[in-house]
Image (tube, rainbow, N blue to C red):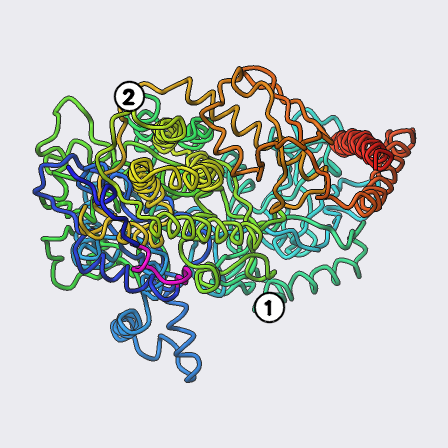
Amino acid sequence: MTSAASETPRNRADALPKSWNPSEVEVDLYEGWVAAGYFTADASSGKPPYSIVLPPPNVTGNLHMGHAFDHTLMDLLTRRKRMQGYEVLWLPGMDHAGIATQSVVEKQLGADGKTKEDFGRELFIDKVWDWKRESGGAIQGQMRRLGDGIDWSRDRFTMDEGLSRAVQTIFKRLFDAGLIYRAERLVNWSPSLETAISDVEVKYEDVDGELVSLRYGSLNDDEPHVIVATTRVETMLGDTAVAVHPDDERYRALVGTTVYHPITGRQIPIVADDYVDPEFGSGAVKITPAHDPNDFELGLRHGLPMPTIMDKTGKIADSGTEFDGMDRFEARLKIRERLEAEGRVVARKFPYVHSVGHSERSGEPIEPRLSMQWWVKVETLAKAAGDAVRNGDVKIYPASQEPRWFDWVDNMHDWCISRQLWWGHRIPIWYGPEGETLCVGPDEQAPEGWVQDPDVLDTWFSSGLWPFSTMGWPDATPELQKFYPTSVLVTGYDILFFWVARMMMFGMFVSDDPVINAGKDPQQRQVPFDDVFLHGLIRDEFGRKYSKSKGIGVDPLEWIDEYGADATRFTLARGAQPGSDLSVGTPHVTASRSFITKLFNASKFALMNGAAPGDLPARDTLTDTDRWILDRLDEVRAEVDAAFDRYEFGKACEALYHFAWDEFCSWYLELAKVQFAESEERAASTRIVLGNVLDSVLRLLHPAIPFVTESLWQALTEGAAGASIVVADWPRATGIAADTVAARRISDLQKLITEIRRFRSDQGLTDKQKVAAKLIGIGEAGLNGQLAEIANLVRLTDADADFAATASLEVRLTGGMVTVEIDTSGTVDLEAEARRLEKDLAAAQKELAGTTGKLGNEAFLAKAPDDVVAKIKARKEIAESEVHRIQARLAEIAKLAERK
């Protein structure tokens, strides 16, 4: 093939703007990709499948930095696999977000003085659907801004017709298998929302509360009594026992007796239980089974009554006391005041900092409450989920998260799946006139006159079906046959136990379904995903967890507006390591923007000089510089592939960053400039090498920074190599052995040039000043072939007959010692240089004195952390080195001045 690079070079940079302005191109590029169908998967394709289901964001949500992190990594994976020749499905969708969505619509109604009850269930649900169609899903437009390579033609919603059918189907199968049951148990209750909420919707916060010690029993010290402490005085209205440790000698005589309850007047038993810590407080605890999870379990063990003393709104009810009707917090105060008046408050500690669970949705403290709910019996389901990882059917990355996985699934409690809401999948249980219960499947009808259960299912129930329900299950579909099991689940480690566990349980439950197994290996059990990649949490640049309420964190859309989607994505991908949290801030995204600008400018330079990909010249005709950069490209490609395959995104991006900036831009382009000036034949060869390397660099970087790489690649290839870099081939191994001799020479060349540049600076030479020089030993070091590069990059000229060395430098290279002699006569103002060095010397001596003083201070060393001391020692060593270097240079200047 004859390359354009062997003809008169053409300036391909004309197709590019003067500078990279992402806001001018990103939207059009993205919509072009979507319109071209690059992200639309073909279930009939003969290519190997690769599939990811997007963790469905809430329909009420906006793109936050956690989403941006998640999506960047998934997009990176799918873009790379598409370029590697896979048929890629990245399936999107949204979660109906039961509590959040219902709350939004209820607030809108409240603004008009209305409640959902004013409309009734059916009309209210219609209003929620109206809101969803008009206002929901704003996040999808934001996902486009980020560059998500989503198959929008397969967009799903957890309450669309197909997914509703899947929910009803699996509910009935679980119910018929005896794995769904109804029981009265303790749940997390939200009084303002009047519903149970899941554990993941409870956020624990430290609050300033009170710890009150109360006296139960007689006020006479000679008569039976116990002291108990509580942070929730109001719950004493539901006390049905006092518990002590069975080995606590202080209470041995009281176990089995009763004690007087100071508010209700009841006699409540004193029981012995290992749960009680005899070292905490008085060693006796009040037991309120209906309002505390630990007390509930103890109550079950001892067969205690479990009266509920609060209604759905958090008001005291049915206690038979004057506190009925009071809000729980008002009752807390009033009860304590009464007990104080009666002399029963032994002590009160305020403030008492302790952790309290709060509803993520309403912000209020949750109330543990005994309630009749629907539950999933998880024992066998959880075991299957654990075994899938134990048997290697599912791999967790990083493997260090596996113990946490096993600890969770091996000790999982039954799952409360009912919610007291109107918006959501209504539980398909119907009740007959005589109290009969019937579970109705998707193709069945309830008998006339029967009434459906009013509750809806936990949102996690429907999202737990996401990997297979979105592909059409329970019906047989081409998508299920082609793309299930999915290839990888990408999510944060913080929801490992909530969402991932539920998907695993449901996925294993349907793993023997003929629909799931159609066309699959009958010997291999189908799991919902082959790999689970768990990334860490996003934190700000100071390591603080993002908090909207505290003003900590960054809106990714602000970054996209200011720095571009590519800079935002690269910042997140470069910091991503399996299981590790990521701290990001303005300095990080600014550095990413600088990298993209560097890549853009370097590419423009290459294009202006006619760089174009083509068939490489014979390897033996290439320079050491060309062979080195081609070999390094091959090595970096292998390093990047290995890192991506292990989900080490940060390592892969770091390798690409340093290769592109440090080796390609900083070295190869500079050396290529010299080759362009040698001869037309050498320039033509260089253009091809430069074009090929740039082509591969852009392809390797494309999954992380798709927009700028598309623009540059289109200019580089002029559309000849394919419609888009999105569907271009991923770089492959060349199979050519690396030229170790060329690598050694370029390494020596880089070291020599770096040392000469430092040496020039020490001599007071500016970057542009040329200076006569002699390079002694350069031939023996094997760098005769690089003389032109050395002269050009460090501004050296040949020594003439009047040459008189004023300074010399020895550089030890792998090929031998090279001595550099330069004549700075007439090029350096010795007096000015001496004055500059004297200032530098004073600063270095001051730093040396300061660090020496600190390291000699025993009091300081005794208190300072080891890392602080280590940093000061390093500063002292640098200061010592600088003092010696500057003093040596001043001595040289003094000799030169004497010579004059």
Within 10 angstroms of label 1, few (less than 14), some, or many (20 or more) residues? some
Q: Is residue 862 magenta?
A: no
Query: Taking 509 as reference, is 251 left or right?
Result: right
Element at label 1 = loop
What is the crowding at mark 2: few (fewer than 14 residues within 10 Å), some, or many (at least 20)?
A: few
Q: Which residues are magenta?
A: 12-22
Q: Position of residue 479 (x, y in %)?
A: 13, 44
Residue at position x 61%, y 42% in the image: 770
Q: Which of the numbered marks, if any, corresponds to residue 736?
A: 2
Q: Position of residue 623 (x, y in %)?
A: 37, 28
Q: Residue drawn at (13%, 57%), measured in percent from left and top?
A: 446
Alpha-carbon distance for marks 1 and 2? 81 Å
Q: Residue at left 31%, top 60%?
A: 14
Between 624 and 305, the one nearer to me in the picture: 624
Q: Is residue 152 left or right of residue 269?
A: left
For numbered disc 2, what is the local secondary structure?
Answer: loop
Find residue 759 and report its image quarter.
top right
Q: Nearer the viewer, residue 835 or 172?
A: 835
Badge 1 or badge 2: first in the primary sequence: 1
Q: Position of residue 476 (x, y in %)?
A: 9, 43
What residue does disc 1 label?
326
Mark sitting on residue 579: none
Residue 322 higher or lower than 493, as above or below: below
Q: Is 339 above or below relative to 644? A: below
Q: Position of residue 525 (x, y in %)?
A: 20, 27
Q: The residue under label 2 is which amino acid type? A: Ile
In this orientation, does residue 9 appear? yes
Q: Judge whether 642 appears above or below 724 on screen.
A: above
Instruction: Identify the amino acid type marked 1.
Output: Met
